[in-house]
Image (cartoon, rainbow, N blue to C red):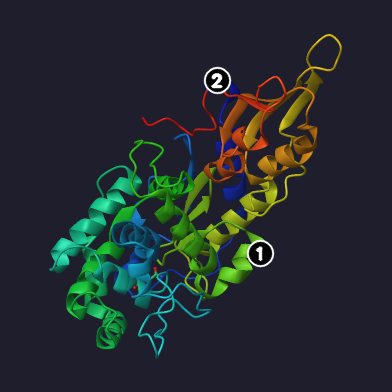
Amino acid sequence: MAAALGDPVRHALESVLDAVRDRTDGDVASYIPELATVEPEQLGAALASTHGVVHEAGDVESEFTIQSVSKPFVFALAVDALGLDEVRRHVDLEPSGEPFNAISLDEASGRPRNPMINAGAIVMTSLMRGDSADEKFAVVRAGLERFAGHDLLVDEEVFSSEASTGDRNRALAYLTRSAGTLGSSAEVATTAYFRQCSLTVNARDLAIMAATLATGGVNPVTDERVISEDAARWTTAVMTSCGMYDESGDWMVRVGLPAKSGVGGGIAAVQPGQFGIGTFSPRLDARGNSVRGVATLELLSQRHGLHMLQHHGASLSPIASLSREGADGGGDTVAVLRGEILFAEAEEIMTRLGPLVGDHGCLVLDFTAVTRVAAGSRKIFSALPETVGRLDDGRARVEVRDPDGVLAGPSAG
Ligand SMILES: NC(=O)CC[C@H](N)C(=O)O
């Protein structure tokens, strides 16, 4: 039972927080005046697994404004609703190597460089359904609430503070408006965007939101599908290349988790297929990324091998055993397959077993112990057994045993 085993993941998080707690460098954001009033010592982290368990350490209850951590999730809502092609007409998907508030606009196409910097994010918000700022914000909020799994409130002080000082963002909106890529008036876009940035979350919310990308679009706590699998993959890809602004390349090398930071002190990080992590600590480095959030994710990644490109050693062969059936050893050959069949496993099965298909006896591919055949790998097997022909006795040269139908894919419902 979990209780008897304790929560070693929580201990891992706590141990990392203890290691980074002494870092007092950096400053809370002050260009949005209200953010300067935040208690700078707060520090929390949460990890949500794709099976919906959340492990928490430190100040996971502390609420803060989501700020730019909202950007990937609004991009996700945009591509989910409009498709990638339509969204790409409004924003490019290239890392900018520039600060988050850069004056970013491609001369020829009028598109901001990517949706993770302000210019691109304001364009994404402008593409939300509805005409008024209220309508667009309602769509953003409802979407972010499905990612988080509960209602989210606006911090009205932070909203007013940014609305009264956010002229640079207004300038970006006017610029994209004049270039033809903004989907609304500049005022509508920025008002909805400022409210979006002022939604309050905690580290646990960010972990669950990130985990919803890790599962391919299903919130693992509420089990609700929030966006399509394609939209989740596209979003995680953009976080990989652009999520940490002008630190994105270095971040991928050192930490290796697609992530997005915000000037409220939050970071959401995704390990596709495995988990989401949320961190919170308000002091920021020169690029606007949380100092201790970055340190927390870096140390966690190093200690526990979380880099998405970590090589975990040769994987288990998908061919568990190969044997001859029949007393004289001249009968059928039975290959017992096992585990997850991704592309490389499908390649191994076909390459190693292909030469065994012959005129004497049948090759039996037994998928009984296979847990899953990835959708793209099913195509590798799709022609079997029709293409390999028949034996003299009329039986197929290859027989597929698949009692659970893993080759057909998951059954609906
Ligand atoms: N990096 C951020 O979190 C920036 C968000 C902030 N609301 C802004 O537009 O300036």
Q: Which structural element holds mark 2?
A: loop
Where residue 106 appears, x then y in whole percent?
Answer: 41, 86
Check the image and report above or below for 79 versus 336. Answer: below
Q: Quadrant of residue 107?
A: bottom left
Residue found at the far top of this picture: 327
Q: Nearer the viewer, mark 1 or mark 2?
A: 2
Inspect the image, locate mark 2, and give the three-letter code of the amino acid beneath it.
Pro
Q: Is residue 163 visible?
A: yes
The front one of 162 and 339 is: 339
Where residue 170 appears, x then y in whole percent?
Answer: 26, 82
- Residue hosting label 2: 403
Inspect the image, locate mark 1, and give the three-letter code of the amino acid beneath it.
Val
Question: Seen in the image, is 309 located left or right of residue 193?
Answer: right
Ligand 1 in which quarter: bottom left
What is the C-alpha distance between the residues marked 1 and 2?
Answer: 43 Å
Where residue 121 appears, x then y in whole percent?
Answer: 35, 71
Question: Seen in the image, is 151 located left or right of residue 12?
Answer: left
In the picture, the quarter occupied by the C terminus is top left
Q: Which residue occupies 39% across, 89% down?
A: 108
Q: Which mark is residue 107?
A: none
Q: Quadrant of residue 291?
A: bottom right
Where residue 315 appears, x then y in whole percent?
Answer: 73, 40
Q: Is residue 154 visible?
A: no
- Residue hosting label 1: 253
Check the image and report above or below for 149 versus 386. Answer: below
The front one of 228 and 226 is: 228
Q: Which structural element holds mark 1?
A: helix
